[in-house]
Image: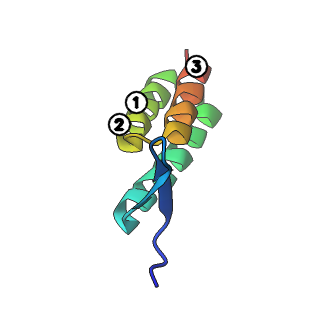
Amino acid sequence: MSTAPKLLVGPTKTEVLMSYAEAKEIALLRLELRACWDRADPTGGRERAQRLAQVAGNDNELIAEARRWAARFG
């Protein structure tokens, strides 16, 4: 049994396993986004939000999160 995080994507909600490296990158991007917000660093925040959108692929929830972060940073 796999313990890898799962993404449900597509209209049929097909399970796609996320690798440990992908999950770790998303977690680190979230930490960096919070740090940019705390530092009032809009340039860094926009860059990391853009990277989160790239990593999100077809995951609508992650794409929406990246858009929310991008909107916060203008």
Q: Residue at x 49, y 62 (%)?
A: 6
Report the side of 45 relative to 54 (left or right).
Answer: right
Q: Residue at x 56, y 40 (%)?
A: 61
The tag earlier along the polypeptide, 2 or 3, is: 2
Q: Amino acid at mark 2?
A: Gln
Q: Nearer the viewer, residue 58 or 71?
A: 58
Report the side of 71 relative to 1 (left or right).
Answer: right
Q: Quadrant of residue 54?
A: top left
Asked if labels 1 and 2 touch by Cβ distance under 8 angstroms, the answer is yes
Asked if labels 3 and 1 touch by Cβ distance under 8 angstroms, the answer is no
Image location of residue 48, percent across then percent down: 43, 35
Q: Residue at x 50, y 53 (%)?
A: 8
Q: Residue at x 55, y 14 (%)?
A: 74
In the rendered image, the residue lying farthest to the front is 12
| On screen, residue 28 above or below 6 | above
Q: Amino acid at mark 3?
A: Ala
Q: Nearer the viewer, residue 71 or 32?
A: 71
Image location of residue 7, percent across then percent down: 48, 55
Per the model, the C-alpha gap separating discs 2 and 1 is 6 Å
The tag earlier along the polypeptide, 1 or 3, is: 1
Question: Which residue is under mark 1?
Answer: 50
Question: Which residue is under mark 2?
Answer: 54
Per the model, the C-alpha gap separating discs 2 and 3 is 16 Å
Q: Quadrant of residue 47?
A: top left
Tag 1's secondary structure?
Answer: helix
